[in-house]
Image (cartoon, rainbow, N blue to C red):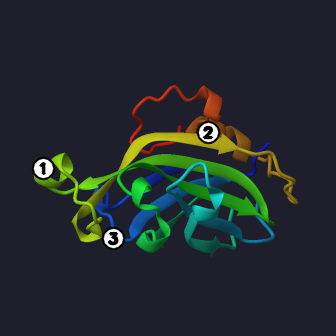
Amino acid sequence: MSIVTIRNVEFFNNPARFLDPYHFRVTFECIAPLKDDLEWKLIYVSSPGNEELDQELDDCLVGPVPVGVNSFEFEGLAPDPSKIPTEDVLGVAALILTGSYRDQEFVRVGYYQNTEYDNEEMKATPPDKIHFDKLVRDISTKLRVTRFQIKWDVVPQTQGLSAAGAAASAAVPSANDLDGDDSNGVIS
């Protein structure tokens, strides 16, 4: 049983210029008070075959986390263009939001990001040298959620909370349960 369940990830600036920071809100539910903070990381994956090229764009600690529905805004830097192989700049990349507790990852939410030029001429005939100031990104609303079982050091409160929580929110689907429906970033 997970003590923390993501309910929604809302991007405030999508689509956006490639070099703009990412800005979004994460809403999650916690069913027991946590002794330590939650750690959230935003990772850009330009080359799936080479993990060394993954860029951690930002991380933040959130806590103390009370029982109930909580949210926070997260702003992460744009990827460093110098760390992206030229052949991997245009087209599809991945953006991953991870949640951890006590150095144990409990959730991973992945999005596809498409990067292209902002005008038809450059889309049709891309220049030899990448012009990052002319690129736009669009994060797909089709997401993939992977949950991991971890050792939580707390016991969920059961007095009245489980019934209210069950009626008010649905469980996060596993990656196998998602069929690719367009969900606008809502995790239900």
Q: Residues within 10 Å of mark 1 (few under 14, many from 20)?
A: few
Image position of 132 with respect to 154: above or below: below
Q: Which residue is mark 2?
A: 172
Going from the N terminus, do you reach mark 1 or mark 2 first? 1
Find the distance from the CA under tag 1 to the CA under tag 2: 39 Å
- The front one of 18 and 120 is 120
- At label 1, which amino acid type do we have? Glu
Q: Secondary structure at mark 3?
A: loop
**Left or right of 131: which side holds 114?**
right
Q: Position of residue 146 (x, y in %)?
A: 65, 42
- Eye-nearest disc, 1 or 2: 1
Residue at image position (46%, 51%) is 93
- Eye-nearest disc, 3 or 2: 3
Q: Which residue is mark 1?
A: 120
Residue at image position (32%, 61%) is 13
- At label 3, which amino acid type do we have? Asp
In terms of image quadrants, where is residue 65?
bottom right
Quadrant for the N terminus, please: top right
Image position of 120 with respect to 40: above or below: above
Q: Is residue 5 visible?
A: no
Going from the N terminus, do you reach mark 3 or mark 2 first? 3
**Left or right of 183: which side holds 52?**
right
Q: Which residue is mark 3?
A: 20
- The front one of 178 and 10 is 178
Q: Are marks 3 and 2 in contact (CB under 8 Å)?
A: no
**Left or right of 83: which side holds 135?**
left
